[in-house]
Amino acid sequence: KAGVTQTPRYLIKTRGQQVTLSCSPISGHRSVSWYQQTPGQGLQFLFEYFSETQRNKGNFPGRFSGRQFSNSRSEMNVSTLELGDSALYLCASSLVAGDNTGELFFGEGSRLTVL
Amino acid sequence: AQSVTQLGSHVSVSEGALVLLRCNYSSSVPPYLFWYVQYPNQGLQLLLKYTSAATLVKGINGFEAEFKKSETSFHLTKPSAHMSDAAEYFCAVRFSGSARQLTFGSGTQLTVLP
């Protein structure tokens, strides 16, 4: 069974640009969550999508957005990039049905560098 | 506010020695608890999880953790460290009412000395 796939793995952008990151969950998983990991702030929750609807959102500005498609794949977008957006963005999928533990399965992440 | 605290951002042990990584959480309602490991340039891999079935949880690679409600702790242990255990370890908590959102501790970097 394939794991969570994130693309691209590495990317470099400049301030003011926007970026879109993609995540394909494990087959059968219907929930996708996104986390930002930085040395200073650690792992912080961005948002969660389930059935193409945002279910939960962390404390991030509106420049951070996401969506989920009918096949459960998800994208997140960051507009007007700032230097502080440099981070590892982790996507995680969860089974939902029949699972009440909320166990998350993580991808390898997309490392964004903003210059 | 609900929080997760990992004591010690860096822990060093000798190969073959006991590994003890500490995690405390703030909640009066026992939550779901997880330990994840992260190797360089990789995502997070689940080591083990507590889901109220048993207080002593065994995970992969010889790790185990004990849930102590009275101490609101979920410390991770391994009897004998191996060089391959060197990585960063994260304690994560799913608090009641938070759906599938996990709150992570700040992480503990484990170094294993030869």
Image (tube, helix red, strand yellow):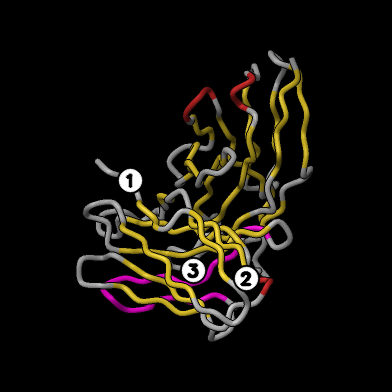
Q: Which residue is mark 1?
A: A3
Residue A85, numbered label: 2
Q: Quadrant of residue B35?
A: top right
Q: A100 or A30, which lies in front?
A: A30
Residue A106 coordinates in the image, percent (x, y): 43, 50
Quadrant in the rendering for residue B18: top right
Pick whichever of labels 1 and 2 is earlier in the sequence.
Answer: 1
How crowded pointer 3 is (Cα within 10 Å; few <14, some 14-19, many 20+) is rated as few
B67 lies above or below A63: above
Let me know if marks 3 and 2 both belong to one chain: no
Task: Give percent across and percent down for residue A96.
Answer: 30, 60
Quadrant assignment, res B99: bottom left
Q: Quadrant of the C terminus of chain A?
A: bottom right
CB within 8 Å, label 3 to label 2: no
Secondary structure mostly taken by the magenta-highlighted segment of the chain: strand
Q: Position of residue A57 (x, y in %)?
A: 49, 77
Three-letter amino acid code at disc 2? Asp
